[in-house]
Image: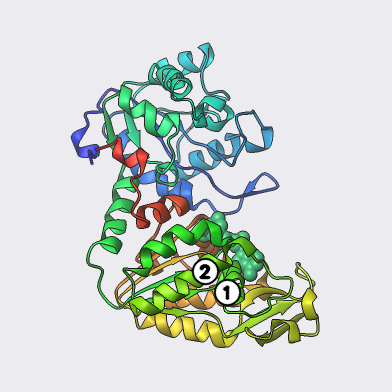
Amino acid sequence: MTTLADLDVNGKRVFLRCDLNVPLKEGKITDDGRIRASLPTINALLAKGASLVIAAHLGRPKGEAKPELSLAPIATRLSELLGKPVKFAGAITGDDVTAAAQSLAAGEILLLENIRFSAAETSKEESERAAFAADLATLADVYVGDGFGAVHRKHASVFDLPKLLPHAAGTLVAAEVEVLKKLTTEPARPYGVVLGGAKVSDKLGVISNLLGKVDVMAIGGGMVFTFLAAQGYKVGSSLLEVDQIDTCKEYLTRAAALGVEVILPTDIVVASKFGADAEVAITSAHEIESSPFGDKGLGLDIGPESAARFAAEIKASKTVFWNGPMGVFEIDKFAGGTRAVAQALTEVDGLSVVGGGDSAAAVRILGFEDNQFGHISTGGGASLEYLEGKKLPGLEVLN
Ligand code: ADP
Ligand code: MG
């Protein structure tokens, strides 16, 4: 991969693709981790005498300008964190944007509007993306790819544009790739993986690929219930992906054949309904419907016994990768499992990696500091696809 050291940016205008896709609640940024993670590359480029045209996406506007997904609040926060002005373009292309880019002096920054307001950015039509990329290319002399969270996407600003300009990976992308390499080539053992989050179907690829590589796999979060159903247990009204039950069965069989220990929770925090004011009971994972809420009960976290077991396995590992919260951590009653797993990761004697947008947000919201972990990946889907063994278009193109 070409890195910043290989690219001459002095006096040049750099098109910098960042990942500034931060969670927002009522227009306020709730976790600015991805903005902070973008600062080293921005500062490095400015120190080398470049001016910057920064592009990023926010949410899924599906090719339309959605005011609530404008990057305007991101420009404000970025400016605060950098301690210098960030000009906000208010558009992606057009005469005003071109003029604003051309008037940048060395050390100045222009942030474009949400790149996904343009349907061409994510288009499946290569020609549409190429035409958009050609427009973007007129804004700068060179390209730096630092939006790790988007490198698994064949999008115009990630994949097509770098082909048109001299290019390099930013320091964030380089650092992410270095850690992922450690997780995939001769990891120190025991190697434990903890998976959670909302959907089994999102994580099946990574489960399948990692089963052959890890010693222990602990599964929590919403996915648990499809695994419990695969073992023949009833799960009340918990998240269940009926069409994935057979796949989960197959994984359990394969894990047994490979000698990989799959750890499922033994107890579950069951709620009367979804919400902070729900009533709560702790049941055996095998008797979820025995709670006072019967078949209406919702499993929203792993129970304390399971949390302790998961934590012990994590602490006994020399390499740990964790993706996906153990429960609905956004509500404090259901944050216990996630908190226990996060705490255990901070105590690992070896490499501990947190991957996934919500997982990274969870550790910060629960009060942990970034430096308590070996690495917090900014990319959920991207890091999972890398671990699945897939080629990531936005990385391939920077080679
Ligand atoms: P990441 O972004 O870290 O990859 P996901 O997006 O897969 O994680 O999942 C995060 C979401 O999963 C959180 O919003 C959390 O509330 C939800 N979640 C975790 N456990 C459960 C559960 N038992 N039932 C419903 N949702 C859950
Ligand atoms: Mg997520």
Tag 1: amino acid: Ala
**Marks 2 and 1 close (CB-CB < 8 Å):** yes
The disc placed on residue 390 is: none
In the foreground, 333 or 72: 333
Instruction: Identify the image quadrant of residue 235.
Output: bottom right
Q: Label 2's element?
A: helix
Q: Residue at x 36, y 39 (%)?
A: 393
Estimate how packed mark 1 is, as few (under 14), some (14 to 19) or many (20 or more) residues with alpha carbons within 10 Å: many
Instruction: Give the percent coordinates (x, y) of residue 305.
Output: 56, 88
Q: Is 95 positioned to the left or the right of 44 in the image?
A: right
Rendered residue at 54%/58% (across/down): 201
Q: Please tell me whether residue 66 is drawn above or below residue 150 in the rendered image.
A: above
Q: Nearer the viewer, residue 111 or 214?
A: 214
Q: Is residue 80 visible?
A: yes
Q: Is residue 123 above or below residue 3?
A: above
SS category of the residue bearing label 1 = helix
Rendered position, 148 above or below 301: above
Residue 128, image x, y percentages = 48, 21
Residue behind mark 1: 230
What residue do we see at 58% from left, 67% from top? Answer: 245
In the picture as drawn, the residue positioned furthest to the left comes out as 6
- Relative to 56, residue 235 above or below: below
Q: Give the CA distance from mark 2 to mark 1.
A: 6 Å
Residue under label 2, please give it: 248
